[in-house]
Amino acid sequence: MKLPPQDGTRFASAWSDLAGIGRDHRRGGYSRHVFDDADMQMRAWFTEQAGRRGLDVETDRNGNVWAWWGSSSRDAVVTGSHLDSVPGGGAFDGPLGVVSALLALDELRVREVHPARPLALVCFAEEEGGRFGLPCLGSRLLTGSADPDSARRLRDGDGDSLADAARRVGIDPALFGPDPQRLASVRTFVELHVEQGRLMRAADPRASVALGSEIVAHGRWRITIAGQGNHAGTTLPADRHDPMIPAAAAVLAVRRLAAECDGAVATVGRLVPIPGGTNVIASSVQLWLDVRYGTTADTATLVDAMVMQIRAEAEMEGCSVTVHRESLSGAVTFDAALGLELAGSLQVPVVATGAGHDAGVLAAHLPTAMLFVRNPTGISHAPEEFAETDDCLAGITALADALQGLLT
Ligand code: GLV
Ligand code: MN
Ligand code: MN
């Protein structure tokens, strides 16, 4: 099949296909969570696009979708990203890598590239952990870095289990788990992603595209502060055990302690008082802590200091604290030889990132690389996330160049 040369038309068309899927009118932006209606519509769109291109599409045992150009047996070059979003997220984080994978394939065909090995396009499941809390769930299960039993038991905010959610969309959760044969069939993975920050601008303000060098260690913790639910009007100050007090102190302590460590960032982006009534002293508060700093040991040490502070604050209010680690991902340095090869051929700057990616999970098992597309404001995980179409097209061309080198 011969397709017209790469231009903005097919990019605009793909983007407009996706624009209406999973819009979140309450938060703004998009909420597309694994196996929900929006995610399934995104998957259906990808499947249809891949089918139009004559690719063989399959969903693996962990809910990741693969589209194959050529036999899937061995030595494959793989590109792609994810279709899910954070709550109220932007349009680009994830889908840009998937759309670019499809259009880079078109570009290779226009160039009449005859690949010496298969190319697969992949959409990884639940990259954001936006529904079940564990980021990069699909790639972690595939590589064996998430325990399938624990994964099956994960619950979303409505109490729905991952196992039930998977079953409802026709995926058998009993099959979740490592997929060594599939993993062994992949030679290289390249993920294109919108930049999520402003390091590209610092490296080279004229660059539309950059190569990723490393990902900092990062993790998530769910902290429950339990007090005594009570009446907002009748409970005397001395009788209160209000978990909102240590929760508020926790938010401030997290920022203060992170500021004391060069390069560390820490965020409380989600805080839920239970039961959540205006005239009710909460009985407990759940807050989620996202910490990113150096190595896993650096991150864990910083979190220990934060938890110690939160416990002290809770004790003063007569509250108790329980801590559950949802995830901890080590620092990643992308494959040096592949990075050198791509930096030489693409002539783009090289930047690190503070964001997690499936490429970071796969990096422990095979050579991986990331391409970033300029984001003029650096804003991400928010409705304002943006990239200019010309920069996206430059990203697609760079991805096609990279894939061409790897496939031939
Ligand atoms: C994913 O985008 C993350 O870094 O949390
Ligand atoms: Mn993200
Ligand atoms: Mn992403």
Image (tube, rainbow, N blue to C red):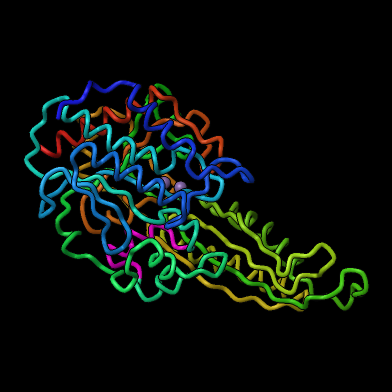
Q: List x then y, in percent, for residue 64.
A: 31, 56
Check the image and report above or below for 380 versus 186.
above
Q: List x then y, in percent, for residue 128.
A: 45, 53
Is 314 left or right of 184, judged from the image as shown?
right
Q: Give the range drawn in magenta.
A: 133-146
Check the image and report above or below for 355 versus 282.
above
In the depicted view, which residue is nearer to us: 373 or 86? 86
- The C terminus lies in quadrant: top left
Q: In which quarter of the image is residue 223?
A: bottom right
Q: Quadrant of residue 26?
A: top right
Q: List x then y, in percent, for residue 382.
A: 55, 41
- The N terminus lies in quadrant: top left
Magenta stretch encompasses residue 139: yes
Residue at position x 70%, y 72% in the image? 284
In the depicted view, which residue is nearer to us: 118 or 166? 166
In the depicted view, which residue is nearer to us: 70 or 249? 70
Check the image and report above or below for 1 versus 272.
above
Q: How many marks?
A: 0
Magenta stretch encompasses residue 163: no
Residue at position x 22%, y 30% in the image? 106
Q: List x then y, in percent, for residue 167.
A: 38, 67
Is 250 left or right of 351, judged from the image as shown?
right
